[in-house]
Amino acid sequence: MSYHIGFDPVADLNSVLLILGSFPSVKSREEGFYYGNPQNRFWRMLCSFFGEEIPPSVSGKRAFLLRRGVALWDVVTACEVEGSADASVRADKIADLPSLFERTNLKAVFCNGSLSYTLYMQYYGNYTIPVRRLPSTSPANPRFRTEVWHAALAEFFPRETEGIKY
């Protein structure tokens, strides 16, 4: 097990939805940004919902998120972890979500997988902001379905039926 520090949140005043992961994978830590493993379904799922190509750069991904009102962070900001396995995470520091809530316009939290949901409920379950656990986009999750994520996103970002593509 080795000690690692996660990433700062991607969020601004226009952020209305927080997608909360657990902790960056080895490949994400190597790339220096969220969901850096090309096998992870996160970017394909989110960009396809909005009808956009996956931005090739970290700055492009950051701009995409902010333009779409999506905040991104991990519930664990520092921990001991073996590889990328959520089961091995020994959380040392939990995200300061109240400060994020104060400086954004977040209306909901979508947890990307069980660990983020469990820790969110343990530390912040008393907050009134709606929270939803969604299947992990990790390549290790055989039960992932894009349709589940798209349905949840569609409830939050209603699509126009005539002529506007998200």
Image: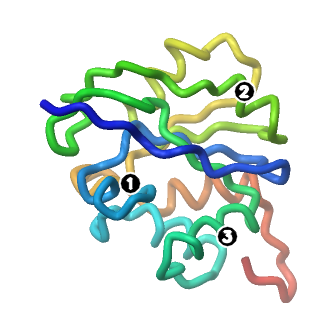
Q: Is residue 143 left or right of residue 152?
A: left
Residue at the image position 75 percent from the left and 52 percent from the top: 156
Q: CA distance from mark 3 to mark 2?
A: 22 Å
In this picture, residue 108 sits left or right of residue 103 = left
Numbered badge on residue 7: none
- Location of residue 103 by image quarter: top right
Whichever of labels 3 and 2 marks the residue nearer the N terminus, that label is: 3
Residue 6 % position (x, y): 41, 41
Q: Which residue position holds label 1?
A: 137
Quarter occupied by the C terminus: bottom right
Q: What amino acid type is highlighted by mark number 2? A: Ser
- For disc 2, the neighbor class at 10 Å (few under 14, some 14 to 19, many from 20) is few
Along the line of sight, the residue nearer the viewer: 111 or 79? 79
Q: Could you say where residue 30 lies in the image, as x and y percent from the top left?
A: 28, 59
**Amino acid type of the residue that numbered disc 3 sits on in the rendered structure:** Ala
At a point 65% along the width and 56% down the height, the residue shown is 153
Badge 3 density bin: few <14, some 14–19, many ≥20, Cα 10 Å = some
Looking at the picture, does residue 28 appear above or below residue 114? below
Amino acid type of disc 1?
Answer: Thr
Mark 3: secondary structure: helix
Residue placed under numbered mark 3 in the picture: 63
Q: Assign a secondary structure to mark 1.
A: loop
Q: Earlier in the sequence, mark 1 or mark 2?
A: 2
Find residue 99 and name its label: 2
